[in-house]
């Protein structure tokens, strides 16, 4: 495919439609940008060649015009010297250069038009390239955001997975047990029924012994 055909395809391409249909939009836009850049380089090189040809043709045109003027002057000089024969030959030479001038003017005009067309094509392609680069920038940002969102979703799924919840339940159960054990440390054990009756019997013995001590230590009243 020639550079002009590629250029036309690029300029006429609907980037949005192409990217929507692409399986990998980011990869596609990268390839398109590379194609645009390569095409732009080729078009600018071709334009430079045409501009160089135009300058050459313009120089040749100027030379032909000077030659034509010179032969016209010579014809006038010869005629002033009554050398009509020389004047006629000089005018023939002038006619040759006039025909070359006419041909060269057509050539320069065509080159002018071609250079103008190149400039328009370059501007169009540069605009398309700017559009493609902007779309690539947006796609990269979207890709970065998508990757970040994907990573967050992975972390959420990992945190809410059955294994994670099981480990959480195990930890929670362990904490519950530790709290229960801590509560039991400060709770007095309730005495058994046998222990309660033993305490009653022990209290009775103590009371009897206390009464005996009181009786033994009780002083007799003095006779009046």
Image: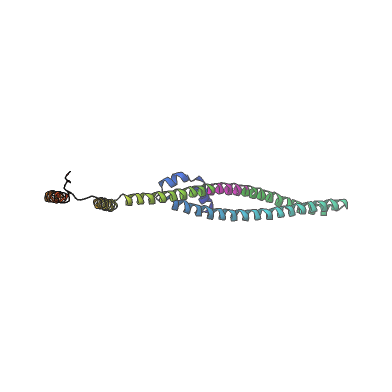
Residue 13 is situated, as x and y percent measured from the top left of the image, at 48, 46
Report whether 4 appears left or right of 158: right
Query: Considering the image in quadrants, where does the C terminus appear?
Result: top left
**Residue furthest front in the image:** 224
Observer able to see residue 77: yes
Report whether 50 appears left or right of 140: right
Of the pair 197 and 174, the residue shown nearer to us: 197
Of the pair 183 and 173, the residue shown nearer to us: 183
Observer able to see residue 203: no
Name the residue at 42% across, 45% down: 20
Report whether 143 appears left or right of 205: right
Residue 63 is situated, as x and y percent measured from the top left of the image, at 74, 55
Residue 48 location, quadrant: bottom right
Of the pair 76 and 211, the residue shown nearer to us: 211
| Most frequent secondary structure within the magenta stretch | helix
Of the pair 166 and 77, the residue shown nearer to us: 166
Instruction: Say whether residue 125 is magenta.
Output: yes
Residue 127 is situated, as x and y percent measured from the top left of the image, at 55, 46
Instruction: Say whether residue 22 is magenta.
Output: no
Name the residue at 71% across, 54% down: 59
Name the residue at 50% across, 45% down: 12
Question: How many dots with numbers?
Answer: 0
Q: Which residues are magenta?
A: 116-129
Name the residue at 53% across, 54% down: 37
Residue 215 is situated, as x and y percent measured from the top left of the image, at 14, 49
């Amino acid at each position: 495919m020639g550079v002009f055909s590629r250029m036309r395809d690029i300029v006429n391409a609907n980037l949005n439609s192409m990217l929507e249909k692409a399986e990998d939009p980011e990869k596609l836009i990268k390839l398109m940008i590379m194609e645009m850049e390569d095409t732009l380089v080729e078009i600018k090189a071709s334009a430079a060649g045409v501009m160089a040809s135009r300058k050459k043709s313009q120089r040749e045109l100027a030379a032909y015009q000077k030659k034509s003027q010179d032969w016209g002057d010579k014809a006038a000089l010869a005629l002033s010297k009554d050398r009509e024969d020389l004047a006629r030959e000089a005018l023939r030479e002038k006619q040759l250069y006039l025909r070359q001038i006419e041909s060269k003017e057509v050539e320069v005009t065509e080159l002018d038009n071609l250079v103008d067309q190149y400039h328009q094509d370059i501007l169009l392609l540069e605009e398309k390239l700017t559009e493609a680069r902007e779309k690539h920038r947006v796609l990269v940002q979207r890709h970065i955001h998508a990757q970040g969102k994907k990573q967050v979703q992975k972390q959420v799924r990992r945190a809410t997975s059955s294994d994670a919840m099981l480990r959480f339940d195990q930890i929670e159960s362990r904490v519950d047990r530790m709290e229960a054990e801590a509560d039991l440390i400060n709770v007095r054990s309730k005495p058994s029924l046998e222990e309660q009756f033993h305490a009653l019997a022990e209290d009775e013995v103590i009371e009897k012994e206390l009464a005996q001590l009181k009786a033994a230590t009780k002083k007799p009243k003095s006779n009046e």
